[in-house]
Amino acid sequence: MMLVRHFYVSQIAGDVTEVDVQVILGTAQMTNRRLDLTGMLAQGEGYFAQVLEGRSVAVAALMARIRRDPRHRDVRTLLEEPIQRRQFARWAMGLVQRDDMSAAMRDAHRHGCPDELHARRLMQALLDSPP
């Protein structure tokens, strides 16, 4: 069984409310438990950044659904890699509010990441406690 990590950023559709975000989170937690997916969803002003971990076929299927979801605009993959173990093993899906990281999320959405190291640093920064 090959495990992968997929890290992407997307623009949040203009009509998405905080209630919608809670619905997304609740649905993700149920779906991810069933599909044995783990990860983290970060929300900044106008952007989502998400890390998904699991079997490659399950992650690919979920990414296809996310790309079709009208609540996400212009999904941009920043990092996709095989992994030996999960970084988010205990999170069916956790939500992290990071308005302080909105500029970094916007830049990654517009320009991508120059390399895997930059993508990993952004992923870690989203997890670190806000200042």
Image (tube, rainbow, N blue to C red):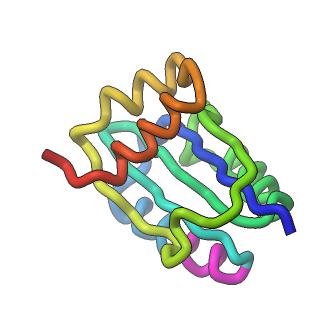
Range shown magenta:
27-34
42 to 1, vertically: above or below: above
Please report the residue visible at 42 percent of the width from the left and 37 percent of the height from the top.
122
Q: Quadrant of the N terminus?
A: bottom right
Q: Residue furthest left?
A: 131
In magenta stretch: residue 33: yes
x, y percent for residue 100: 22, 39
In-front residue for pair 50/86: 86
Q: Quarter of the image holding residue 33?
A: bottom right
Q: Position of residue 61 (x, y in %)?
A: 81, 58
Q: Is residue 102 above or below residue 67?
A: above
Residue 60: give x, y in percent of width and height. 80, 53
* Secondary structure that dominates the magenta span: helix
Outermost residue on the front side: it is 84
Residue for point 55% across, 53% down: 51
Q: Is residue 125 left or right of residue 26?
A: left
State the residue in front, 20 or 62.
62
- The reply to whether residue 117 is in sight is yes
Visible in this render: residue 75? no
Picture coordinates of residue 50, whole percent (x, y): 52, 50
